[in-house]
Image (cartoon, rainbow, N blue to C red):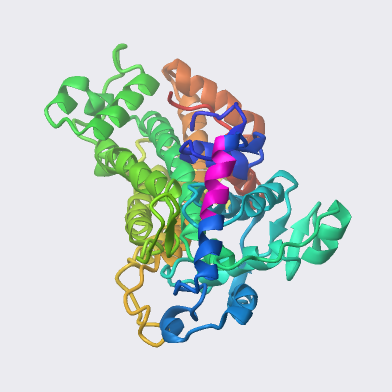
Amino acid sequence: MTTPVLEPVTFGATPLSIEALLAVANRQVKSRLQADAAYRERIANGARFLDSLLDKEGVIYGVTTGYGDSCVVAVPLEHVEALPRHLYTFHGCGLGKLLGPQATRAVLAARLQSLCHGVSGVRIELLERLHAFLAHDVLPLIPEEGSVGASGDLTPLSYVAATLCGEREVLWQGERLSALEVHRQLGWEPLVLRPKEALALMNGTAVMTGLACQAFGRAEYLLKLATRITALNVVALQGNPEHFDERLFAAKPHPGQMQVAAWLRQDLAIDAPTAPLHRLQDRYSLRCAPHVLGVLADSLGWLRGFIETELNSANDNPIIDAEAERVLHGGHFYGGHIAFAMDSLKNLVANVADLLDRQLALLVDTRYNHGLPSNLSGASAERAMLNHGFKAVQIGASAWTAEALKNTMPASVFSRSTECHNQDKVSMGTIAARDALRVLELTEQVAAATLLAAQQGVWLRGRCEGARPLPAPLAAMHRQLAEDFPPVLEDRALEGELRLCLTRIAEQHWRLHA
């Protein structure tokens, strides 16, 4: 389970962890904006330097010029103040589903943390209002489709910029309201964005980064849950626990793979005497579980590095270096690191779906489940011909797995030249992050199905003559699961229980490996 963040989260000069951002996104902790005089002066200095350049009629992209390919179009000083509103207005063309509340908070937090670096030329008042949106849970309604991931998440982030100015709609206190009405109720004056502020808000990677943080947290828990499910299935299928021997894994010492094997040894009490074995070698979905799950375990470190570096970076354009009195034009809005991380994560996670789906297929099949009833039905002999247990659940899991595998095609290789060939190489990072979340959703469904089937299999195995007591970690999990999911004796519709299991997974309800 992800380590909980208990202290208030401070947005400012100190880097944020994925866990800190998720704690804010899930409203588990309070947050604050760094407020010491030196920090506030640093932020103000950037905005003052930008104003001084305007007084000198300096040429600054997106401030005294048009946007993108229109950077060659000069904007007279008398129109500079109007330019920010035009930027967020013409980008108000997002489509698709709206981001959920947690995702929206993650986006707001990611954008705020980036602007807190003090090199975006924005006022402290903008940071304060953006933080106030988080503190009061004022959530812009952001369509999730329309970003190519460079120049950052322009279209979805336009909904953040617009709502700060009292335009478009927000979710507040469970209601969909106009942003202007919520400003009125809170006693706020809508912002009028200064030159560069709309660009600073929109020209960055906050949507893909916020979603990536969510995906990372879910994948980290899924890894531990899949390991626990595997241990339950080793018991249900009377597998060979010696496949996870410490000396065996010392011979191929990938750290994550070794960790998964160690968790399985802990769950299965591998050092205790074992029951007689049905076979020398189990099928791969049991025997090679550490090798499959270990790839995800070993990848979490570099995935964290990519995501947290992006989270704690200034990723708009241009960068305003007030100290050196320079405006640096570049391409930090490009989301390539997040795109690659999310394309990789969805492959890693889909492999977990495939592993658990194969374990479920073994559980329901009397040719491979070593004496368990067909389809794990708990019906009596007199009613066995009427009952089909987990037959349809296995079909569903196969469908969810197939869809997860289908969605692993990398988004990052599908760059499209856009915006008059100014954005002629783009990252597709936001599409990759959305894909990763969809693959996670499907894989969690497979995990829910396999967990309930494993619970049923362990219960059935416990009824067999000569059944051995469960090792303590699995016995505790078995008891917890029984509180929500009673054995399937007669066929019943399991949708409600599967949905409850998914809720438990989303809540990270079960305390798993430390």
Compared to residue 391, the image places residue 504 above or below, namely above
- Expressed as whole percent of the image width and height from the top left, the position of residue 181 reads 85, 63
Q: Is residue 357 magenta?
A: no
**Residue 243 appears anywhere in the view:** yes
Q: Can see residue 488?
A: no
Determine which quarter of the picture holds residue 11: top right
Residue 409 point in image, percent of width and height? 33, 67
Q: Residue at x 48, y 79 (%)?
A: 65
The picture quadrant where one finds residue 328 is bottom left
Q: Nearer the viewer, residue 378 or 32?
A: 32
Question: Principal SS element in the magenta part?
Answer: helix
The quarter of the image holding the C terminus is top left
- Single out the residue that lies furthest toward the left: 251
Q: State yes or no: residue 45 in magenta.
A: yes
* Camera-nearest residue between 485 and 50: 50
* Above/below status of 492 relative to 179: above
Q: Which residues are magenta?
A: 38-46
Q: Residue at x 36, y 31 (%)?
A: 234
Residue 67 % position (x, y): 48, 79
Please tell me which residue is depicted at 78% across the width and 55% down the height of the picture: 172
